[in-house]
Structures are given as C-alpha cells and as structure tokens.
Image (cartoon, helix red, strand yellow):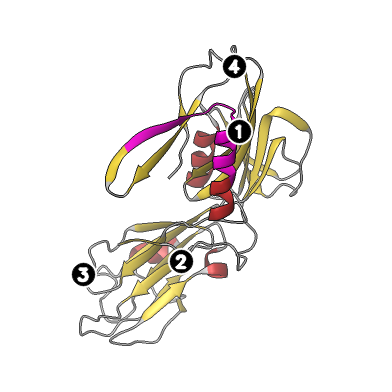
Amino acid sequence: RFEEFEVPKNKYCQDCIHDMWFLRSGILERERSSIGTAQGTRRLLTFTTPSDKRTRRVFKMISTPVLDLLCCAFFILSTQTYIVAGKNQVVDWTFGMRKGGAQVDVLQCQSVTFDWSTGDGMLHDVWEFPTEEAYDACEFNETTKLTEESVQGKHVLENEDTLGVTKRWFGCRVGSHCQAGKMKIAVKVRPLLADKFFQSECVGGTPLIARNEDDNTSCRKRCKRKRGCIALEWNAIAQKNCKLFSTAPERRAGRANADAQCEIAATTCAAEDDNSEDGGGV
C-alpha cells in the first residue's frame, strides 16, 4: 500500500519536477509538482505488509529513474485507469443486527450487500426510504420495495446503483423489525474523484463552498464529507485554496496553473474499473 506523507520542506532540491503516482483511499492518482527550497514538501512513500502492521519507510521521494520505473510498473500492474480496488460493504441483515441504524460509507461504483443468506429463522425484506425523516421513524408509507419477504436472501447495490453521490436509507418492513430489531441502515455514497487535471483550474461547475485546507488530501476529505460535493479544485496559493462544486465542471483541462488541480467524480461504472475487493462487514 502506497501512501503520501508530508515532511519538512525540501532542502536538497531546487526547482525540481516530480511525476508521481499515489494510492489514496483506493484511488491511484498521478501528481506532478514543482518543489523548491522556498516552497513545497518532500514526501515519503511507504509499504505495509499484512503480517507487519507497522508502516516501514522504503523510499524517499527523489526524482530517480529507479523510483520512476517502480511507480510506473506498480501503476501498470494495478489498473489501466485511475480507479483501483476499494472496499465493498456487507450488512448482516438479521433481527437485532449489531450495527442497526449505523451508516455505511462506500465510494461510487462499490457495492453494499444486504445479506441474510445464513438466516435467523425469520422473514426479512429490503425497502428504501424516501427521506431521512421516514428512516428515523421507520415510516414505510412511501418506501420502495427492493426484495420480497424470504427466510434466506441477499440484495446487492452495485455499479450504477451506487453511482449517484448521495445518502440513502434502507429498512426491513416485516413486523417490528425496523424499530425493535434495528433492521435499518444508511448508505452514504462518496465521490470517486476519477477525472483529474493536474496543473489546471476547473472549467465551469457550480461552486458549493470554498475553505482553507492544509493540502489537497485534506481538500479531498472535505469533499467526501460534504453532502452534494462531486468535484473540487485545489489551488495552493489561493486565499481559500479548497473549492468544492455541487455540479461537475467540464471534463477537460482549464487555465494552466502550476499550483492548481481539478478533480471530478466518476460518471460511469465501466466494466474495466475494478472496485470488487470485499471489505469489512457491519
């Protein structure tokens, strides 16, 4: 697993150009930046093995042919797009479920599985609530049926079902399962910032908010937390350097700006995009 770490300003490189690949939150990202003594940071790449949970520093980010070759080889072996394996979610859909009423977070195009295939001897189904208020009250008057009642079953939201960047609410309508059995769950679909335009400002789009953040990684996290955010522009020297958008900018490079980059959420779940790695259950 490769990650980015910020460390003190670079004392060894004057006006260097770096072309890097990072794996952040399940997304492989390319970044080109100019780093000098007066501005910017050095970065470390790290590698973690399943048997060793402590992160070991293996590379300093120095522009060398060996590091360039390694990063490019890692990219080619992993995927042909910016999108790589992420975490799907499995919900234990049974009466008295341990995480009943919790929120499940997934990226666009990842899956959420409501699973009662092993069964608890009771009938269950899955319905979708139209609003959070209906979800909180377990009010099923205007809900949408997703499955029939069954003692054993499974329902999967995947691909285009989780393409929309939004929050959705689900529950079991059988008897008092929603309230007494806590058989309800919220699903938040976060933006998969698949289209990236480096050293470029965004073109068009509807601004949502603009805030100051320490770096572009923090800006991404803000976008993923903010409901309605589907794109961002990071501009390191702007007064409010993290700009979020509620409608997507044009999917092309805008005005050249070495301190900016534009990132836009996915608009399709293409077959070649691999988001199939199973994650933790709830």
Q: The disc labelled 4 sits on which kind of residue?
A: Cys
Which span of residues is magenta-colored? 55-72
Query: Quick check: 99 above or below 142?
Result: above
Task: Identify the residue shown where x is 49% and y is 27%.
Answer: 43
Residue, disc 1: 65
Residue, disc 3: 96
Q: Earlier in the sequence, mark 2 or mark 4?
A: 4
Query: Quick check: 173 above or below 193?
Result: below
Q: Earlier in the sequence, mark 3 or mark 1?
A: 1
> Which residue in the rendered view is the most extreme toward the front?
66
Binning the other alpha carbons within 10 Å of mark 3 as few (below 14), some (14 to 19) or many (20 upward) gives: some
**What is the spatial separation of the Cα atoms under label 3 and label 2, in whole angstroms?**
23 Å
Binning the other alpha carbons within 10 Å of mark 1 as few (below 14), some (14 to 19) or many (20 upward) gives: few
Residue, disc 4: 13
Q: Are marks 3 and 1 in contact (CB under 8 Å)?
A: no
Q: Nearer the viewer, mark 3 or mark 2?
A: 2
Q: Are marks 4 and 3 in contact (CB under 8 Å)?
A: no
Q: Are marks 1 and 4 in contact (CB under 8 Å)?
A: no
Which of the two residues, 138 or 156, is positioned nearer the viewer here?
156
Q: Are marks 3 and 2 in contact (CB under 8 Å)?
A: no
Residue 18 appears in view: yes
